[in-house]
Structures are given as C-alpha cells and as structure tokens.
Image (cartoon, rainbow, N blue to C red):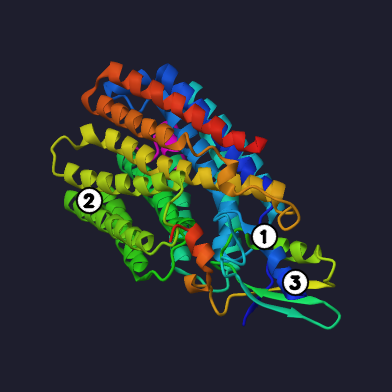
Amino acid sequence: MMNTKEKILSALKSVYDPELNINVVDLGLIYNIEITESNDVTITMTLTTPGCPLHDSITSGVRYSVEGLEETGKVEVNLVWEPAWSPDKMTPEGLRLLGR
Amino acid sequence: MLPQTMGSETNIKLPISFIFFSLFALVLSQIQLLVNGQLMTDGSFRIPVIWSSAHLLVLGWALMAAMGAMYQLVPVAFLTNIWNERFGFIQFFVTAVGITSFAVMLYWSPQNAIIPGVLTLLGILMFLVQMVMTLSKQAKPTIMTAFVGSSLVCLFVTISLGITLIYSLKTGFASEYYQSIFKAHLLMGVTGWFTLLIFGFSYKMVPMFSLSHGFPMVQAKYVYGFYFSGLVVSLVSFFTNNSILLKIGFLLLLIGFSIFSWHIKIIIKKRLKKTLDKPFRFALVAIGFGNVIHLAAFIMLWNQDVGHFAGPLIYAYLLLWIVLSIVSYLYKIVPFLWWTYKYSKEIGKNKVPSLKEMMNEKIVPTLFSLFIVAVLIVFCALTFHVAILFNIGQFVLSIVFIIIAISILKVLKK
C-alpha cells in the first residue's frame, strides 16, 4: 500500500510539461516534498529555465494535482531557482523520452 | 534556496489580438501582390501598389506579429510583467487602425499618407513606451536586454525616417537626402529592428525549444558588438556617400551574423531534446539563409550594378530570414497562447494535450519547403526580370501564405 508521499509523487506524474510532454517528476523538477503532521504539503520545485513561459500553468498544475488527493490538507508550492535545474536531475525515463 | 513567487503570464487576449490581425494582413498583402505585383518584374519597386503591399507585409504582418510575440515573450524572457495591459489594448487599436489606413492610403493616394502614417507612428510610439517601461522594471539587464532594447531604438528610427520620406515626398523637404533617408529607412527596419529582435529572442527560444543546457553565452556580446557597429557604420555611409565605409559596415554586419550562426550551432549541439520540432527546424534553416544573404550583400558591393541586385536581395532577406523565422516561431507561440487560455486551469486536474498536439506539424515540411522554393523562384524572377517566373512563384507563395495562416488559425479548434 502506498504512503502519502508515494501518492503525491504518483499524482505529480500526471502533471506534464506541455512543451516537452514529460511529467514534472521524470523531468527532475521536484526537489522536495514536506508533509506536516496535519497533512499540509509543501512542494519545493524548479523549472528548466527561469523564463519558462509555462511558469504559472505548471506550478498551478502541481498544486491542483496534490490538492485532489484525499490524504492531503493545504498545499503550498515553493518555486526556487537555486540549485538550478540540470539534466542530471532527470530520471532515466525522462532522458529516454527525450531520445537520450 | 531562492523562492520565486512572481507570476509572469500575460493576458493572452493581448498577444493573440496582434497575431490574428497580423495573419489577416499577411493574406491581404499576398492577394494584393498577386493581383498587381507583376510590375515588380520590370524592376519597378517604388510604385504605390508595392509600397502598400510591402507595408502590409512588413508593418501589418511582421511588425504586428512581432509586437504580439513581444507581449508574450518579454514577461517570460525578462521576468517582469507588462507595464500596463490596458494601455496595450489601446495601443493595439491605434496601431491596427493606423496600419490599415496607411496601407489603403499608400495604394490610393500616397501623398496623403501622412495622417495614417502619424497614427501608425503613434501606435508604435505607444508600443515603445510600453516596452521601455516594462524593460526598465527588469531587475538585472542581460545581453538579451541589449538586443531587444537596441531593436526598439531601431524601430523608432525606422518609423521616424519613414515619416520623413512621406513628408519629403509631399513638401520637397530634404529632397537632396531622399535616397540616403530611404536606404537608412530600409537598413534600420530590416536589419536593425527585425534582425536584432530575432537575435535577442533566439537566445531565449533556441535553448528553450531544444532544451539546451550548459552552453557558453560569451559569443552573444561579440554578435551584438559587430552587428550594432555594422548598423551604425552603414548608416553613416548612406549620408556621407562613402562606399568604403559601406563595405566596412556590411562586413561588420556579416561578421556579427556569422558569429550568431556559429553560436546557435554551439547551443543546438548542447541540446537534450534529440529530435527537434519541425517548425523550429525551419527557424534554424532561416538563420542559414540570413547568413548567406549577408554574404551575398557584401559581395554585391563589389559589383558595379549594385542597384540591380539590391531589390532582390532585400526581398530574399525579408522572406527567407525574417518571415521564415517569424512564421516558424508562430507555429510554437500560437499553440502556446491558446493552450494557456484553454488548458492552464485544467493541468493537474484533467488530461490535457501537449503543445505538439495543438498543431498539425505534418504539413510543415512540405509547406515550408514550398515557401522556400517559391521565394527562390520570385528572387530569380526579380533578378533576371522574368515576368512568367514571377507570376508562378508569387502565386505559389500567396497560396502557401494563405494555408499557413489557416493552419495557424485552426489551432483555435483544439
């Protein structure tokens, strides 16, 4: 049976970067998931570039996907640029989808 | 970790208003050329119908599309919100009315084009105010700021020189400098405004669409230095009638463009996305064309009959570099705008399409290859004055443009 963190990760896999058509987990955009005792969630994440035009859409999508879970309370998305995203943060599946 | 909470998405109705207007202007300019343009094959470029069609293409389509793209790209590239969106809508209305009446007046009564010209100027000035105010809010200017800022200065100079040309035509003011002003108007508009703008945004869009990472940016400073110096030196040469200065200016432009091509090649080599999207590949092809035409323009200066080649080369530069770049990027920008409008609130809740699924990419290679062939046919027709070749090339080109406009507009059905 999946714990809350695994369920959150699974929900996040439904959020795709529409330009690359790869989900935010495989792209390596999710840096950290914090869950409080009252099940409030803070997701620390980044984007592939600071000027990403899909900035608001992707961060809102991350919030919506986790808010949709029964197990979670309030959800906060903390977008950071440091450490900067780099390809080594991608999963092997993400790299495969890019043809690498 | 540095938190980032600022949203930077524009109300998409603003960029999309400009882009839709531009697509209609594109279709109209092509129909106009198709009906009247055979006059160009006699080398008659400076006639009312060509002025009207050229301005519909350059102002109505390329300028309006560039403005629309800027309303979308500036906030994301410079991480700052548009200064005043309401002012942006008023600017759209003023510019659209100005350009439409300007094109009509150039066709029917060029000597009375001054009032629509001033209205167009007002719209462009409003745009410049909007962009200057927006860029001034940028926390940390970058090399992209230099490219885009300089392109905006060139746009202002282009329009001012254009208005001076009309005033000169009507009153005889500065008539001894008419030729110099005309050349400066073309240089500032074509190579200054458009090329610097495409350079600047390419540094954002090329890494973004190829997912390139870990590339150097030092070359961009040299691109800017050489290209901007080339513009200034060429401009001075027009007003001093100094042919050596003109050769130096064109050489500097060629070096600047060549470094840009080389730099983009380096960025592309550092890409993670193995297979590039089809429209984006043509944006890269356009860079190659731009470079070759810069080289041809430089070589042309050693020919005695410069005037014979200048028109066809400017035509090729406009179509194969500027128009091809803009059209290729429109195939990326319009789906993004529509996707944001329709699906940005659905992501994470429901399954949403990818941007690639918003547009029929399959027709792009055939359509864009036909575009290139048609432009080359028209280029040959203009160079060798072959009317039948011109009619064939222009007919194909107009059809291709109309299909491009329809295929871009079809994204609204997704």
Indicate the secondary structure of the residue bearing disc 3.
Answer: loop
Q: Chain of mark 1?
A: A
Three-letter residue code for mark 1: Val
Percent across and percent down for residue B271 are: 41, 62
Q: Between label 1 and label 2, give the one nearer the viewer.
A: 1
Q: CA distance from mark 3 to mark 2?
A: 72 Å
Q: Between label 3 and label 1, give the one nearer the viewer.
A: 3
**Residue position for label 1:** A15
Indicate the secondary structure of the residue bearing disc 1.
Answer: loop
Q: Residue at x 20, y 56 (%)?
A: B248
Quadrant where the N terminus of chain B is found in the figure = bottom right
Q: Chain of mark 2?
A: B
**Residue position for label 3:** A2
Quadrant where the C terminus of chain B is found in the figure = top right
Percent across and percent down for residue B16 are: 63, 43
On screen, residue B229 above or below B69: below
Query: Toward the viewer: B109 or B325?
Result: B325
Quarter occupied by residue A53: bottom right
Percent across and percent down for residue B383 are: 23, 28
Q: Residue at x 22, y 54 (%)?
A: B251
Three-letter residue code for mark 2: Leu
Asked if badges 3 and 1 are on one and the same chain, I answer: yes
Magenta residue span: B163-176
Query: Toward the viewer: B39 or B185?
Result: B39
Quarter occupied by residue B44: top left
Q: How many marks?
A: 3
**Residue position for label 2:** B246
Q: Residues within 10 Å of mark 1 (few under 14, many from 20)?
A: many
Indicate the secondary structure of the residue bearing disc 2.
Answer: helix
Q: Is residue B29 rendered to the left or right of residue B19? A: left
Among the two numbered marks 3 and 1 on one chain, the one whose residue lies closer to the N terminus: 3
